[in-house]
Amino acid sequence: MRIEDEIKQSQFVSERHKATVNLMFTNNWLVDRIKDSMKAHDITLQQYNVLRILRGSHPKPISTASIRERMLDKMSDASRIVDRLVKKDLVCRSTCPNDKRLVDVTISEAGLALLSSIDEEATSMRDLLDQLSEAEAQTLNVLLDKIRN
């Protein structure tokens, strides 16, 4: 559906203004779908993000500071998120042997299994843009990167 129909607004200051509104609206739309999918697994979007980061570094541990740097939501409290994931047995935490001030975090087998089951679902993050071809998705990525540069 067109952005004009979604928000019931027919005029914009410019195409760039319309694109900005469209990006913001689409971001919220995507986040809502991912949040709904995560509810079924009793994890938040931020917890899912941390689990994905840890899976990407698996089996090598990473510090909470490194997790924070890689998170999509820079305002998230990585330490608190890791605490909650530890309680759910989805990650393991230990003191870094090289620097006692740092905490190393690794994803557990239960965490890997959870991500695997989420990946298999029809509503997983990778399936939300199925209506785009690979070429269109590549173009979109180039454009989004260009906006941030």
Image: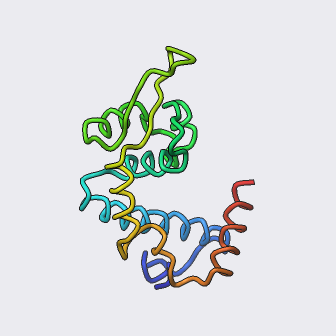
| Placement of the C terminus among the 4 image quadrants | bottom right
Q: Position of residue 122 (x, y in %)?
A: 37, 76
Image quarter for residue 93?
top left
Give the answer, above or below, for where 49 lies relative to 144: above
Relative depth, front residue between 74 and 134: 134
Residue at image location 24% in from the left, 53% down from the top: 42
Protein image colouring: rainbow
The spot of residue 109 in percent (x, y) is 35, 48
Where is residue 128? Give x, y as percent: 46, 74
Res 39 quadrant in image: bottom left
Q: Which of the two residues, 75 or 45, is positioned nearer the viewer here?
A: 45
Query: Residue 134: x, y in percent?
Result: 63, 80
Q: Residue at x 49, y 64 (%)?
A: 27
Q: Is residue 46 left or right of residue 141?
A: left
Asked if residue 133 lies left or right of residue 89, the reply is right
Instruction: Please report the residue visible at 50 percent of the width from the left and 15 percent of the height from the top.
Output: 101
Residue ID at (57%, 38%): 69
Observer-nearest of 67 and 143 = 67
Residue 118 placement, left or right of 134: left
Q: Is residue 72 above or below residue 60?
A: below
Q: How many marks?
A: 0
Which of 22/106 is in front?
A: 106
